[in-house]
Image: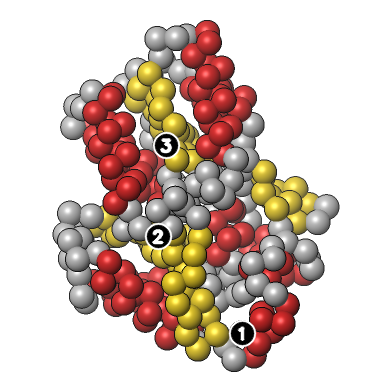
Amino acid sequence: MKFKVIVDSCGELTPEMKQDERFASAALTLEVGADTIVDDETFDQADFLRKVAAYPECPKSACPSPEVYQKGFETDAEHLYAVTLSSELSGSYNSAELGKNLVLEEHPDKKIHVFNSKSASVGETLIAMKIQECEEAGMEFEQVVETVDAYIESQHTYFVLENLETLRKNGRLSRVKALVASALKIKPVMGSTPEGSICQLDQARGINKALVKMVDYVKEREPHSSDKVLAICHCNCPERAQMVKEALLEHMQVKDVIILDTAGVSSMYANDGGIIVVI
């Protein structure tokens, strides 16, 4: 095996990746009250969303330990990579760096690189796919790192939330503002900053108008998209994801499209009905 990519579990693996030994997931854990949920293949989205809706406080997540990454890097692959949730949102990147250093203490000649996605969810998925593309093109390790770093800088993340409760529970939205927004059916249009934190781009009354605004932002900010992969992730709303895909493809050309359902951490951020777009 020439290369291996470890993606923390905020990044959804495609069905093909799940069957490919060159890809692995490092599971975060989620806490909803007294319940601890491992974000791996056992994750039950419907049960998780029910628990979050019933719990008055904000659900929490814990990143994989350095030892999880260390174990993942202890393989015969020549080139080793990790792709993590934005370091602005989680300690997963720092944990992966510590895991890398633990391996390099024993095996200083190993080639390991940790990518801070500056994104989340399918943003990580696309980065893992880019690594695969570079490796299969025969690039040297250092060239892969340089190419993928440039790809990360060119990537943009957008999302629309149906449910504002997670924002309210984690203190990003006051109870009064959340109640007013809920009463008026106001939905925020969110995006990522260049550093990888979350910002509000706009808002609209009603989910469909918010999705239209998000589509407009994507079209305006991605004028040269014909060589890019469009990734859409949804939390329990496949029809909505398909609608967003069709709306985008009416106005832009892309190399390919992937649509995935959110795993655990992404379900926590997006909440029921959320849509994430990365290109």
Mark 2 and mark 3: span between their CA atoms?
16 Å
- Give the image quarter of residue 94: top right
Give coordinates of residue 150: x percent, y percent: 28, 42
The answer to whether any part of residue 220 appears in the image is: yes
Between discs 2 and 3, the one toward the N terminus: 3
Is residue 91 left or right of 192 when viewed as pictured? right
- Callout 2 amino acid: Thr
Is residue 18 left or right of 179 when viewed as pictured? left
Give coordinates of residue 257: x percent, y percent: 28, 60
Q: 183 above or below 12? A: below
Mark 1 and mark 2: span between their CA atoms?
23 Å
Alpha-carbon neighbours of circle 1 within 10 Å: few (<14), some, or many (≥20)?
A: some
Q: Which mark is residue 181?
A: 1
Question: What residue is shown with label 2?
Answer: 157
Image point 50% across, 88% down: which residue?
205
Between discs 1 and 2, the one toward the N terminus: 2
Q: Residue furthest right?
A: 34
Between discs 1 and 3, the one toward the N terminus: 3
Q: Which mark is residue 115?
A: 3
Mark 2 element type? strand
